[in-house]
Amino acid sequence: MVLTQFRALKEQQKSGFAVLADPDKIAPADMHHLARLCNNAGVDYLLMGGSLLMIHQMELCIQRFKAESNIPVVLFPGSPAQVTPYADALLYLSLISGRNPELLIGQHVASAPQVKASGLEVISTGYIIVDGGTQTTVSYMSNTTPLPADKPDIALCTAWAGELQGKHAIYLDAGSGAKRPVSVEMIQKVSSNIAVPLIVGGGICTPEKVYDNCRAGANIIVVGNAIERDPMLIKDMAQAAKAGNEYVLER
Ligand code: 1GP
């Protein structure tokens, strides 16, 4: 179970490394190659999802990936239309940094029968969009204001509220292609004060940033854009997460 793995990472204060593939940007024909790169690098998870999306393309992408890899595929859906039983698990996102009722509960009610029928492992996730220095697709599409980047206390209170509501995990996301990723200070503040696993993503471009996030207490580090631009980064970033884990162990 993916959530059991997430919880083990949290317990051991370690980080897993996740590659995010956006089916609007990657072709099914590229998935074999991506799977081999992920296998060789020791990537822990493949996240699949995007803000727009053709669902058929996504299902084919997942099938192609799974033909080459045992790495769990976790859905990171931009909308309920992206829920497909071809994956292993679903980040069941509630946008708790926003005040848009549709994304807090409305779409969940409408899609509940579909999610129940999918048989997917459902990981209830408190999703927090943090200001990444530019208007990212997710803040535009969700019609919500991101959480201020320099307010770790608000991030923590939001994460606590999610935890108190029973969310299995918290996701701090500066948004795809963010100019400024979530700060180490915010990751530390949230991670050290919550009991559930912390996922961090948005604008992470270098192995050094992966390493820093790992040391700061991120349990799953998600990278999409940088890897789309240069798939060879997968190896260095996965290694940086492992190096960060060793540092945490030796502390
Ligand atoms: C976006 O956290 C993810 O929701 C990944 O962001 O594409 O900028 O790596 P990037």
Image: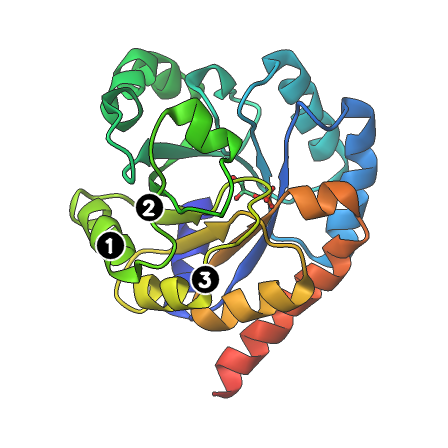
Residue 183 - label: 3
Give how far across and how far down residue 193 sits, in percent.
Answer: 26, 66
The mark found on residue 154 in the picture is 1
Quadrant in which the N terminus is drawn: top left
Residue at 26 percent across and 25 percent down: it is: 100
Asked if one can make out residue 120 in the rendered structure from this viewpoint, the answer is no
Amino acid type, residue under disc 1 in the picture: Ile
* Nearer-N-terminus badge (2/3): 2
Please rate how many residues cluster around mark 3, counting C-alpha atoms within 10 Å: few if below 14, some from 14 to 19, many from 20: some
Q: Amino acid at mark 3?
A: Ser
Across and down, in percent, residue 223 comes to 61, 48
Name the quarter showing ligand 1.
top right
Q: Earlier in the sequence, mark 3 or mark 1?
A: 1
Per the rendering, the mark at residue 210 is none
Q: Is residue 105 left or right of residue 217?
A: left
Report which residue position mark 2 lands on. 147
Q: Secondary structure at mark 1?
A: helix
The residue at label 1 has a CB less than 8 Å from ligand 1:
no
Dot 1: within a 10 Å radius of its alpha carbon, few (fewer than 14), some, or many (20 or more) residues?
some
